[in-house]
Image: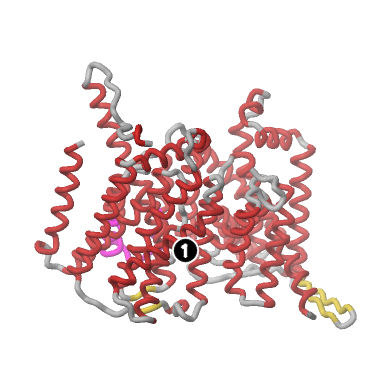
């Protein structure tokens, strides 16, 4: 029982990171109706850019985040027209073709990363958040590593900024309109192509930044993409496809599941547990925990 | 149409004669594996091309078949021909269990769930003691290249014929295509989409399990990376997409081209597997953008256009034979 508070705190802290993984993914799905199989690979590429920038400039990874966001937002902005062309094609089944296309992209990125970065694991050292905070509450010891706390704060900040942008700005209004009804928003003068490009850019940038945070907390290697893709899917399905407000709760749930398996059971079975939960949720409530997905 | 049959029978006849002509066991082995990939590509295409559901965990069924065979032969000393059908049945049961919740939903959920299933199955094989964990399992050795060649050829030809009958000749093909095009309308015509999708899924999983069983006995050593890894699914997807979704000949052509390329690449150009991954991904992505109908779809589309242009009066082509049986 002494470990229970620690397990819950750990889960909560990890869950924060998962919010940022899934929120961009869910946004891209809501607007473009594309399931991006490359989400984990964007995270991995972002993590490696952070790793090398950290080596070259010796700046703290948390200060590098804006630069990484900009670089990857640009990449996403430039890749999006290709995706758009695939999913708005006339031939065959465009949605499935979009899936196949991003699946191909993911394979290519993984291959490129394995070729250029090798098979070794790295971690990104963050000097400003090296220590941990020890809490002693009447005999119950809780350790809170600062880096995880920083990760959670980062995730909350991103969520708040995104919430503000979506609810209060004209751009956000356009994004929500596009997600609601594509044709009608087009009639109101919203340029679907451009907005989709921006959204995809934001999504890729967010995923890449999250990769850097993951590099600070855990380790990174060129093969990690697939694991994070599974986790992103898990959260988004749990929250309900395209339902942004459900993402944080699903992410915290995943964090708790993971930390409980880590502490009480065999961590090797985490993926199996994730799949069983996913399976049960799909069986009972296919539209996510809140029944609000598409 | 009869010319197509003649060509297929001719191809089968040539393949039957191969072992007596080619004495080199290395080439025989390569052709055997090419046939294996034809089987995997067409079985993937049953669900992807015909039914419109992407199964990104096809390798899981292959691996389940391989592991079932290995476990049966090692633990209870079953003869191979007992283990072979059991492997197919087990793969079918896994498909049934995984399909019930996921096939009721839109395609994207299914793609995700099968992908997660494949990773979960691989994880299970990695951590269990009975499967040997990451070390994999050894099977009783039976070194007879000709036997495996004919077994593989017979099984894949059987799968091909079964699919050909079910999907091109029998009403079942029309049903799955109706669901692919619009499952709401299909439902309004009295079809049960979930049931038919489930049937198609099982129909695609059982051959994968059987091929996995043959592969395991043939290679005599399996481990989670080789039979449950992503590469099995990835290659099947590339072959089907590159060859042409929604046909049986397309994925077979794709399988032959991609597999020949892979063999040539690994044997002569580079032994660096990772480069192959880049090429696979590039082929999928470029194929989707530039050749959405695949090689076979493009060729047959071109031929059909030319044929239609030649005929002066426009004749409605009888594509839906057997529609009245539905």
Residue ranking furthest to the right: A138
Residue ranking furthest to the top: B313
- Density class for disc 1 (Cα within 10 Å; few <14, some 14-19, many ≥20) is many
Tell me: residue B236, above or below residue A27: below
Q: Residue at x 50, y 77 (%)?
A: B128
How far across and down, in percent of the image, does residue A151 sit? 73, 62
Quadrant location of the N terminus of chain A in the rendered image: bottom right
Does residue B260 show up magenta in the picture?
A: yes
Q: Main secondary structure of the magenta part?
A: helix
Q: Quadrant of residue B152?
A: bottom left
Q: Residue at x 24, y 26 (%)?
A: B306
Label 1: which residue? A114
Chain of the residue under the numbered disc 1 shown in the image: A
Does residue B209 show up magenta in the picture?
A: no
Tell me: residue A193, above or below residue B164: above
What secondary structure is found at the residue carrying circle 1? helix
How far across and down, in percent of the image, does residue A242 sit? 65, 45
Find the magenta span and give its range: B259-280
How far across and down, in percent of the image, does residue B207 sit? 35, 58
Inspect this view and state whether residue A191 appears.
yes
Q: Position of A7 compared to B114: left or right?
A: right
Q: Residue at x 29, y 61 (%)?
A: B269
Tell me: residue B97, above or below residue B242: below
How far across and down, in percent of the image, does residue B326 sit? 38, 36
Q: Nearer the viewer, residue B29 or B196?
A: B196
Inspect this view and state whether residue A38 appears.
no
Q: Position of B48 compared to A249: left or right?
A: left
Q: Residue at x 62, y 46 (%)?
A: A73
Quadrant location of the C terminus of chain A in the rendered image: top right
How did the renderer colour the structure?
secondary structure
Q: Quadrant of residue B286?
A: top left
């Amino acid at each position: 029982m002494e470990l229970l508070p620690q397990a819950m705190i750990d889960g909560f802290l990890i869950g924060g990171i998962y919010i940022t993984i899934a929120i961009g993914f869910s946004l891209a799905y809501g607007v473009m109706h594309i399931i991006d199989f490359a989400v984990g690979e964007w995270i991995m590429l972002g993590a490696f850019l952070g790793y090398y920038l950290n080596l070259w400039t010796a700046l703290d990874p948390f200060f590098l985040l804006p630069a990484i966001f900009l670089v990857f937002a640009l990449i996403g902005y430039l890749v999006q027209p290709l995706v758009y062309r695939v999913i708005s094609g006339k031939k065959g089944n465009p949605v499935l073709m979009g899936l196949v296309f991003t699946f191909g992209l993911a394979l290519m990125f993984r291959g490129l990363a394995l070729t250029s970065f090798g098979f070794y694991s790295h971690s990104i050292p963050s000097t400003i958040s090296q220590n941990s905070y020890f809490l002693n509450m009447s005999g119950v010891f809780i350790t809170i590593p600062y880096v995880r706390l920083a990760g959670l704060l980062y995730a909350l900040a991103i969520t708040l900024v995104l919430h503000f942008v979506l609810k209060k700005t004209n751009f956000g209004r356009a994004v929500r309109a596009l997600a609601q009804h594509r044709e009608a928003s087009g009639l109101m003068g919203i340029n679907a192509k451009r907005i989709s490009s921006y959204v995809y850019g934001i999504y890729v940038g967010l995923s890449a930044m999250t990769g850097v945070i993951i590099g600070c907390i855990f380790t990174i290697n060129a093969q990690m993409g697939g694991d994070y893709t599974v986790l992103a899917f898990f959260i988004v399905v749990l929250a309900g496809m395209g339902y942004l407000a459900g993402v944080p709760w699903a992410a915290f749930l995943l964090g708790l599941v993971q930390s409980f398996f880590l502490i009480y059971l065999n961590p090797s079975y985490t993926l199996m547990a994730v799949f069983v939960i996913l399976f049960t949720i799909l069986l009972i409530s296919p539209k996510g925990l809140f029944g609000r997905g598409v | 149409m009869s010319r197509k049959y003649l060509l297929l029978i001719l191809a089968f006849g040539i393949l039957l004669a191969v072992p007596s002509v080619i004495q080199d066991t290395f080439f025989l082995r390569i052709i055997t594996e090419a046939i294996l990939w034809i089987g995997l590509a067409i079985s993937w295409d049953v669900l992807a091309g015909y039914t419109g559901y992407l199964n990104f965990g096809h390798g899981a069924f292959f691996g389940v078949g391989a592991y079932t065979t290995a476990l049966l032969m090692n633990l209870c000393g079953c003869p191979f021909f007992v283990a072979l059908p059991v492997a197919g049945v087990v793969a079918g049961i896994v498909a049934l269990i995984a399909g019930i919740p996921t096939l009721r939903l839109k395609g994207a959920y299914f793609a995700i769930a099968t992908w997660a299933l494949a990773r979960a199955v691989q994880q299970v094989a990695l951590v269990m003691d009975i499967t040997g964990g990451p070390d994999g399992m050894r099977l009783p050795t039976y070194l007879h290249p000709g036997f495996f060649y004919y077994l593989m050829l017979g099984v894949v030809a059987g799968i091909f014929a079964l699919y050909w009958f079910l999907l091109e000749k029998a009403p079942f093909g029309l049903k799955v295509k109706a669901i692919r095009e619009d499952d709401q309308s299909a439902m309004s015509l009295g079809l049960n989409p979930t049931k038919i999708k489930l049937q198609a899924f099982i129909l695609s999983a059982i051959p994968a399990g059987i091929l996995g069983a043959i592969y395991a006995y043939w290679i005599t050593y399996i481990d989670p990376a080789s039979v449950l890894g992503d590469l099995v699914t990835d290659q099947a997807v590339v072959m089907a997409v590159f060859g042409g979704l929604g046909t049986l000949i397309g994925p077979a052509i794709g399988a032959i081209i991609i597999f020949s390329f892979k063999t040539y690449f690994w044997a002569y150009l580079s032994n660096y597997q990772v480069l192959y991954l880049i090429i696979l991904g590039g082929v999928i992505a470029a194929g989707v953008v530039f050749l959405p109908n695949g090689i076979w779809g493009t060729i047959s589309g071109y031929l059909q256009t030319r044929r239609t242009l030649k005929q002066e009066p426009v004749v409605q082509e009888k594509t839906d034979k057997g529609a009245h049986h539905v």
